[in-house]
Image (cartoon, rainbow, N blue to C red):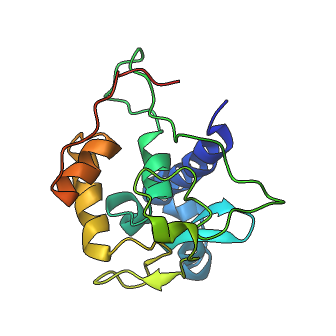
Amino acid sequence: MEGGVEGFALLTDLTQSVLLESAPQLLGDDRERSALDEITVRLGPGQIVERGPKEAIFAAPRHPYTWGLLQSIPRLTQSKDEPLVPIPGRPPSLILRPPGCAFHPRCPYLEESHKRIVPELEPVAGAPGHLAACLLPESERAELWARLQAGDRPEEARAAVAGTTPPATTGDVA
């Protein structure tokens, strides 16, 4: 199942978040609780693409991989017949990692430089403790996420942010 492990990992984090909010007495002292208040999103072993307070990751994620994970989670408000949004492509090889950003073969926001430059984990502006490893400018990432939240498909969001027309699609997803 495409994205199954990725979705499960994020669903596990989401479950921890629900437990944190509904049963804090189960977690013990503040040191134990603070470890569960942070989410780390990994593309593969050792490949952290985003880290931060759970509230920041769920409300304002700043990496396209995190966006894909969040959009692939079933919602209570959606019809059971409505398909989930998969992350396109295949996960990167753990043996032969692609050059540049490890997510670039699957990223709908790919730019040529992403194939050569490995992004560093950097602070997200205005969000203490929130870090993301993405080469897209912060303002562009914020706008892309807002458009995705409003219902745009990735190609529509990218075109709107870039001020261009999105490519025509058939609506079929393989």
| Residue 114 screen position, x and y as percent | 51, 68
Identify which residue is drawn at 44% across, 58% down: 110
Q: Quadrant of residue 40?
A: bottom right
Identify which residue is drawn at 44% across, 74% down: 135
Locate the N terminus and report the quarter of the image it occupies.
top right
Q: Quick one: 80 or 16, which is closer to the camera? A: 80
Q: Is residue 32 left or right of residue 39?
A: right
Q: Quadrant of residue 93?
A: bottom right
Q: Quick one: 153 or 6, which is closer to the camera? A: 153
Identify which residue is drawn at 39% across, 58% down: 58
Query: Seen from this angle, which residue lies furthest right?
Result: 95
| Residue 162 screen position, x and y as percent | 21, 59
Q: Quick one: 90 or 142, which is closer to the camera? A: 90
Seen in the picture, residue 113 relative to 12 is either above or below; the reply is below
| Residue 85 screen position, x and y as percent | 44, 34
Asked whether the viewer can see residue 56, the reply is: yes
